[in-house]
Each structure stands twice: as structure tokens, then as C-alpha cells.
Amino acid sequence: MFEWGDIKLENNIKRRGVDDTRRLPYYPFRDDGAEIEKAIRLMITDYVNAMTGQHASVNYPMIDYVTYVPNLPLKLYDSERIPNTTFGPERLPNRAQSASQASFGATLASYREDSLFDYGKNLKDCKGRKVVSRYYNYLKDVVDPLLEMRNHKRLVKGHLTYPYMQPRWVPNGIQT
């Protein structure tokens, strides 16, 4: 019976007994294949992270920070009412501009269509469904409770929580 792990280069090499470089110093399939697999793994990791976890960690906190305009005004204005070297509310955007900024931030940061790897159950291919579901269940059953516990400890200690990397917050891709 074919298993997903059978196609991994490391498992293939080990299963066939050609993994020992001392016993078999010249084996390009093993040696060159390891370099290609490493490059693919790095590329996929970088790409998937950029579209999922990195996006969630940058995009979703905006609801808490960008929508409160005094916290992060997109523009400050010159005002004759206060000296140039002084900061004050007079330098903040007016109501209309503040409402526009808050609306923009809320639009970007509040839309989540899915969560990471939740689509496995919809795949027609049984093997693909099994692989994606395994990672989804790992995120749901192991990672999410762990991060939930960490956030609870942060809150108890008086620190800010950080829910943005919890799997239920991380989308399968950029959604705006």
C-alpha cells in the first residue's frame, strides 16, 4: 500500500538502504536530490507562510491599531494653534478622514473567509484529503489550544494577548 511518506526522498533512500554516505559515497540521486528537496521545502515554506501566517500577523492586528486613528494616524497636519515642536490632537485628521481610515482598516482586517487547511474535507482526491486534513487537525487540536493557553497566561500576567497567529485566524491565502 502506498503511503504519503513513501515519496519523501529521505524515506525512499532509507527504505532502499542507500542513505549511508560512507558505504555509498557516490549517489547523485540521493545527494543532488537532497539539495533540490531542500530548495523546494524552503520555497514552499516561505510562500505558504507569506500568504497565510505572515499575512494574518500583519493584516489582522490593523483592526486593533489602525482603526483607532490617534494610535496610528496615516497623516499628521500642521496647525497654527500649537507650536511646530509640539504634538497635540490638533494635528490629527478631521472626522471625515478619521472615519475613512477606520473604515479602510476595518475592511482589510475583519474579513476572513476560511482558516488554514480547512478545505481538506472538500478535496475529491482521498490521499490529498487525508494529507490536508491531517495538518488541519494538528493545527486545530494541538496548535490552537497551545496558543490559546499562551494567550491566557499573557493576559493573567498583564500582557497583551496575540490571537493573530491562532490557526482559526490564519487564512489559506490573502483575502481582501
Image (cartoon, rainbow, N blue to C red):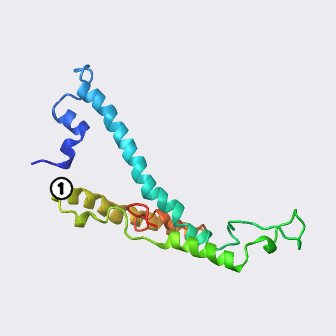
Residue at 68% across, 66% down: 74
Point out residue 49 in the picture as x, y percentages from the top left corner.
Answer: 43, 53
Numbered label tally:
1
Residue most extreme to the bottom: 95
Along the line of sight, the residue nearer the viewer: 134 or 39? 39
Asked where in the image residue 64 lies, by quadrant, the reply is bottom right
Residue at 65% across, 74% down: 68
Asked where in the image residue 101 lies, by quadrant, the reply is bottom right
Q: Is residue 93 above or below residue 48?
A: below
Amino acid bearing label 1 = Lys
Q: Which residue is mark 1?
A: 127
Residue 158 appearing in the image: no
Residue at 31% across, 66% down: 118
Q: Is residue 99 above or below residue 49?
A: below
Point out residue 129 in the picture as x, y percentages from the top left corner.
Answer: 21, 60
In the image: residue 64, left or right of residue 91: left
Residue most extreme to the left: 1
Point out residue 113 in the picture as x, y percentages from the top left corner.
Answer: 39, 71
Along the line of sight, the residue nearer the viewer: 156 or 7? 7
Residue at 29% across, 27% down: 31
**Callout 1: 10 Å neighbours few (<14), some, many (20+)?**
few
Asked where in the image residue 95 lies, by quadrant, the reply is bottom right
| Secondary structure found at label 1 | helix
Point out residue 44 in the picture as x, y percentages from the top left corner.
Answer: 37, 47
Residue 112 appearing in the image: yes
In the image: residue 94, left or right of residue 46: right
In the image: residue 120, left or right of residue 103: left
